[in-house]
Amino acid sequence: MIRVEHLSKVFRSRRGNTLALEEIDLTVGDGEFVCLVGPSGCGKSTLLNVIAGLEKPDAGRVLLDGKPITGPGFERSVMFQEAALFPWLTVRKNVEFGLELAHWPKAEWKERIERYLRMVHLWRFRDAYVHEISGGMKQRVALARALAPQPRVLLMDEPFAALDAQTRDVLHNEVQELWRQSKHTVVFVTHNVREAVRLGDRVVLMGSRPGCIKEDVKIDLARPRDTESDVARYVARIMKVLRGEVEKVIREEIDDAWELAPQGRVPPGSAGGMGDGI
């Protein structure tokens, strides 16, 4: 369904050019849930933005059903790390805005809004304003808004990164169930390896700058998935590959301080670039 061919992306500034992505080749099948994982700055979000049509590649191309992507389209919905809701609108009106933007027939708005707010368990909060609901609820509103116009592709850029672990765990279960029902094609960016293993049919491991694909891991586990047992086995396998990429990023950022750190320890003040997935 989605095909990325020989894609490269350069960011230009007065300080010079930065090669963000280099020779990316990737295929995402219809109805697949693919997670992109890698260290900070490896180009995961840039690749997602190119698929969304929000960025243009400098070389190569992205195809959807064999047709080049040249800009945003209603067949692709994007869900960002921040919920990006309109605070002056109610929950219902925020979902309605997504349907209006996609030119969905107005006669079908009521049914669709109710259906998707019930799917994310927010129907009883339909008339609440954004400031009256929790962070996890905001992300569920954003998810309902993204799904209501029935896009073929859902692009998710670290949508749960700012949430506490318990809320994120609940949303992982809900996303798995929503995906099972709808079978949307999903491309999901995350720093969190456990999150990727819980959600993805495949986990695509990206290397440090310039961004490239190091490995494509098929997650052969039954759903729904918990956070223990077999999930931990896949996490360990993926982290073995990614740890070296994270160290490359840290070395670039702190230079000589790396050599002064005790053996096997990350120098103080460096985040490590993988969030709580390590």
Image: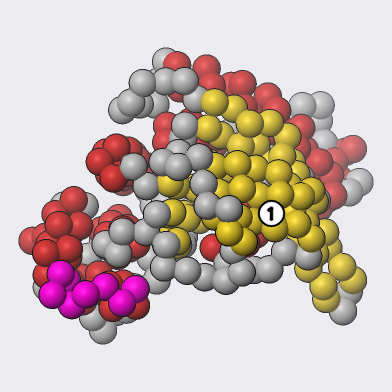
Q: Place residue 96 in its image quadrant.
A: bottom left
Q: Position of residue 154 (x, y in %)?
A: 42, 54
What kind of element bears circle 1? Answer: loop
Lateral position of residue 271 relative to residue 111, left or right? right
Please state if 27 lies on the left or on the right of 212 as rendered.
left
x, y (%) of residue 138?
A: 29, 63
Residue 6 vs 277, above or below: the answer is below
Quarter of the image for the C terminus: give it: top right
Compared across the picture, whether 150 is left or right of 153 comes to: left
For residue 229, say whether it is visible: yes
The answer to whether residue 103 is magenta is: yes
Going 25% across and 41% down the picture, which residue do you hit?
181
What amino acid is at disc 1? Gly
User: Is 271 displayed left or right of 72 in the figure?
Assistant: right
In this view of the protein, which residue sits in the foreground, 2 or 160? Answer: 2
Task: Write the start and end of the magenta stretch as one range.
Answer: 102-109
Q: Is residue 244 above or below residue 124?
A: above
Q: Residue at x 81, y 30 (%)?
A: 262
User: Image height check: is 94 above or below 112?
Assistant: below
Give the residue at mark 1.
Answer: 43
Tell which of 162 and 194 is nearer to you.
Answer: 194
- Does the stretch in magenta take in 3? no
What x and y, as percent, mark residue 264? 77, 27
Quick one: label 1, few (<14), some, or many (20+) residues within 10 Å? many
In the image, 172 versus 203, the foreground residue is 203
Give the x, y percent position of residue 51: 58, 58
Farthest residue, direction left: 124
